[in-house]
Amino acid sequence: MVTDLIKIPCVRNIVFRDHLQSYPESILNVTLHNVIVSLKQSDGDLKELWIFYTNMDGFQAKFPMKNEFRSQLPTSPSLSSKYTITLRLKTLATCHFDIPVLDEAIKLAESLDALIARTDESTCDVTGLFPFYFPRDFEVIQDGWTAFSVESEFSRLQAISDEWRITDLNKNFAVCETYSERLVVPKSISDDQLKRSAEFRSHGRFPVLCYLHKSSKSCIIRCAQPLVGSSVRRCKEDEALVNSMLIQRHKKGWILDTRNPNIVKVAQSKGGGCEPEQHYALWKRLHRHLDRHSVLQESFVKFIDACIDQSEKDRWLSKLENSNWLLYVKEALTVACIVAQTIDREETSVLVHGNDGWDTTLLVTSLAQVLLHPDCRTITGFEALIEREWIQAGHPFRTRCTRAAFGKSSRGYESPLFTLFLDCTWQLLQQFACSFEFNDTLLIQLFEHAYSSKFGTFIFNNEKEKTKYNGVKKTVSLWSYFNRPEILRTFLNPFYEPNISVLWPSVAAQSIILWRSLYLRFYENQIPQQEAWDEYLIIKEKELQLRSYVNKLRQELLELERKCTEKNSNMIKMEKDSVTTT
Amino acid sequence: MDLADSLASLRSVENVRLIDRFNNRQQIIGTIFLTSTHLIFVDPEGKRETWILHSLISTVDRLPITQLGSPLRIRTKHFFSADFIIPKERDCSDLHATLSQLKPDSYEKLYCFLYQAPNYLEKVWDPFLLATEYMRMGVPNLEWKVEDNNSNFEMCDTYPPLIYVPTSTTKSMLLGSSKFRSRGRLPILTYLHPNGASITRCSQPLSGFSARCLEDEQLLQCILKTNSQSNTMYIIDTRPRINAVANRAAGKGYENEVNYSNMQFKFCPIENIHIMRSSLNKVLDACELKDPSMNQYLNSLDNTSWLQHIKAVLEAAIFIARAIDVEKKNVLVHCSDGWDRTAQCCSLSSLLLSPYYRSIHGFRMLIEKEWFSFGHKFSDRCGHIRTSDNKEQSPVFLQFIEGVWQLTQLYPTAFEFNERFLMSLHDHSHSCQYGNFIGNCEKDRLDLGVKDRTYSYWNYVLQNVNDFRNPLFRPQSSYASEVLLPTIFPQTLKFWLNMYHRFDSGLLPKENTANTLTHLVDHTIALSDHARLLEKRIRELRFSLENGVTTPTSNEDINELQENQNPTSSIEHDSGSSENELNQTTAESNPPKSNQHLQLLNSLSDVESGISSDYSPKMKPFSPSFILPHQSSLEINDIPTIERIAFELNSIAVDWRTYHAPLHCACSSPFDSAQRKYNCWRCGENFCIRCIEHGIRLPGLYSTNFAPVCKTCVRSIKTSPLYIDITASAISNNRNKSNIND
């Protein structure tokens, strides 16, 4: 029983501290899904803080031994009865509980340890997570589960080209467990051919369309690696499928492999590999390596450690350098730019894959779409992009986000790919501050919800899992929560001016900067920045109001003018009349 | 002139390639022209002109010859770096020789003595009185007095004539102390906090290993006693301890704690000018890196230690501010000579302590006081003239400016000025265009007579104050009105991309929010002015409808003038006093035309307005000036013609071209993201600064302020027959105004 894990339901009289503030006389309640801290505000009111176990990344208990205390006593009497538990959250916050009674502190630590371990992906039943118990506390205006269907995206495609169709081949996830049930494929390829192609690709992830460019009609295709193996197998149907996606036959397409040739060789020896040029003669191959999995995770851990290190010794820049995080941001953006350039300038198609086609592949294809497609820079468009390119495309969110920057991973499957995607998007937002409908609040919220959420959007590894656990019925979609006026308002960018052109960002090292408002938001005072943001809104609002006021005045003036002329002509007429009568 | 002679041999070089710093393939072929003041590179289509002011050139280097010719690298003090490839080697060496000789060998040849400012600037130096600034702080008072010991610079030639010291000091005490301090720079008051704690500054004592000076010790006790809230005070040595110790061997050093009772000593380790100079050089090298990998770039930044130095300066300033505001203790600050690190720390801590210094006007006062009056050696540190020792050059002022910038990044709403202002200050400390930054102390400037012979930088700022305003400034915010005591972590500091990479537009954000904001604020000002005119016209037409007046004439009556004197629009209110000053000065610089001309215009206008047969008398009974606009409608007799209203409406664009849309100005010069664009108030299009005129009054505006208008629109307005009408009325208003005043 889960309740047995709770060794102590309530701890009183604790001090709650984070980097900027401290609340004495707080009360901590341990529940099934979270701890609830009641903080005493300066005005005497209580504020409740909910910390979900899914949000807890790790914790440290610091319980000095009795004799240690004695040695400390003369110098710092305030420490005399303080046992500290430090919680590290996936949202990157750090908080401390100072507990006066040792026994309570030990019990709390034990409870937390067990309850946090319970959220581990390998041991935990997803239906035990909070989203399955979350009572929706707001009015749904638009149901997020149905807001982004394949059909709605397909209708946009059809306006550009009629060479595509939706296939139901994957009904009940029969062909590919990690794809959604309906997929967009070329009209000229039959379901049988698709099936064969699926057999030839890792995890059955056969090539599907993910983006069609309006001006050039060239497209981005993604899939998993082909099962070429050391015997260099081939699959005619797969070749036909891939070739049919090349719209202009006179131009060669590009196959972008997100692994370097050495890794491909290793993969090939294990049955995978890359499309051999002799069988895919219409395509050129390009290897642009993007680090993934534990390498990326390690980088993230080091990076966050550098960000929150406030020790006296100034090793910040070298620690930042060592973490390699900004390097990965730069690399991901560069590869996305290569794809965008091929699509828009070279006007030919790109097929992207790595190993499984659900990690770096998605990073590249989604970023390229932000560059290429103005719709992706609107709020709904960006939500649709995440739904389409990350959730429906089978990025294993729960596996990747079980631990964030502080936790010890049990199986080592965690990787902050989605965070990297958000960071890259933020870099674009930074460089094109007026081309996005949203501001960084949306990106920060997405980051937080991906790691720990009340909503069901990011808790499954793929669509099949969502169906299996009946996520649509039993949990609430994050988009339902976001897409309400009072929330949407906080995401709006006052500078937004729709920009239909393709974005060409600078990917030079000098242009890649640290996303302070995410990584440092619990460690730097954010109020001055918020004030500045309010001022942005006021300035924009003032200008808008004045513009409509001036227009109103102008209309009124013209109306008056018309009346005056009428009156004048009437008077002249009257005068004339009077003249004629006399 | 010597300069002309040396330039005579070489006036222009053709077929020169300008290579982009980061993209070798991007080359422009054009011609270099040398004038007596600038090096100008023009591409054949004339689309792009690169102007380099001679006094801003820092280094000219010849690089190894390539197939295309001889490369010449010019680096400037405002972080522009250009590689020119010159086809003929001879031309290159001539150019190199000429440019290398450009640096003047005496003050007399500096640019400020040649510079001819545009018409709107006058050689007017509004007198800066140190006394005014001290008066603002409530000095002299019971504790502090002013002394004229230094009126002929006899005690200390790098201090101002008047110095502020504790009332309990005697002249002999001051004299004795000044003899014991390096360069005679004795402790003097620089900032007095409302709580009574003060910052005093001086140079190091000539203590050596054992020397002491009773007068100096007494003076410090006098300073301590000015603040009754604490019985100790800080002596802050802004050098690393080891430097201070090393100075003892040269007969200098730091105060011996034994001799100075009740003093708390503290070292704030800021490195010396030589280390700072080499650190900046490393920054410049890091900026030159061509397509570095992320790690190369971060590594090279780390190796410069530049941000660590900035952090050291800021931390010292924060320590001082905390001591003053929280501990309520007096602080005495010195370094070696007390004109570099001391100036940085005193000015930054004053900025943290007093909101006044965060306004444009206050910031000026701060610089006048800490940097100009107390003798920062601008000419030596910036290397204005050839005779100055290269080892004397150091980015001390730049570090101060960057420290301020870092604070503006932390508190975006707390400062009235913007980044452009800080960059302009830095650039003009090197440009020698204005006399303020010339010489090494007040005495030098007095001897050179800069106030009579050069333009003042502050005058330039005042005339362009709108470009330097921070649109986010929120005076009522707690950050703008209180003491700022930030905690600086290494992560807090940013690399100032817009300063060091400002000419590399490829690296900068493509869409600049700061400029977008300025654009919005400008638009708001234009629209609210226009709205007031519309409101007035509506009142007039309503009145005429209701009262059956059908005699439209074209001249405004006095009431409008009255209303003009009482700005009611909130925008004008917000803009503060300095803008009003601006408006006044611009108005004065364009005096009204002669009366004869005026009458001619008046008669013309009467003919134009046509319809009226009954010409109503212009002089109305004088009405009280505090009538609200809507109440004054009774006085309205002059109803504008329909053509005139159309003309007025036509002169103001309600919607402006979005800031980012055009990539080129109408003159075909390309916009880059850092550059400020100006919107023409009439057509709403974006223009570069050279295509905008500021000397026209738009008929669609209520106020008689000059508005930025593009050249095309200026022409079309001026050729309109109705325009004359309006100018005439504006002038007649002016005349009326003077009549009334008489």
Image: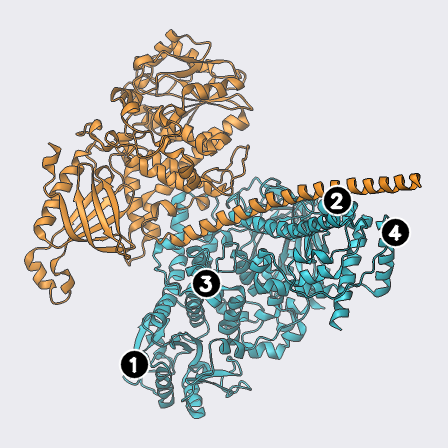
Pointer 3 or 4: first along the chain: 3
Give B154 or A215, whichever is nearer the viewer.
A215
Residue sitting at 33 percent across and 12 percent down? A171
Task: Identify the residue position indicated by label 4 in the image.
Answer: B613
Pointer 4 or 1: first along the chain: 1
**Rounded to the nearest whole Å, what is the CA distance between mark 3 and mark 4?**
70 Å
Residue sitting at 45 percent across and 49 percent down? A533
* x and y, in percent, of residue A62 in the image: 14, 51
Q: Are marks 3 and 4 on the same chain?
A: yes
Pinpoint the chain carrying mark 3.
B
| SS for callout 2 | helix
Pointer 2 or 1: first along the chain: 1
Pinpoint the chain carrying mark 2.
B
Answer left or right for B437 relative to A42. Answer: right
Q: Do the residues labelled 2 and 4 touch (CB within 8 Å)?
A: no
| SS for callout 3 | helix
**Rounded to the nearest whole Å, what is the CA distance between mark 2 and mark 4?**
22 Å
Query: Which-is-in-front pick, marks 3 and 4?
Result: 4
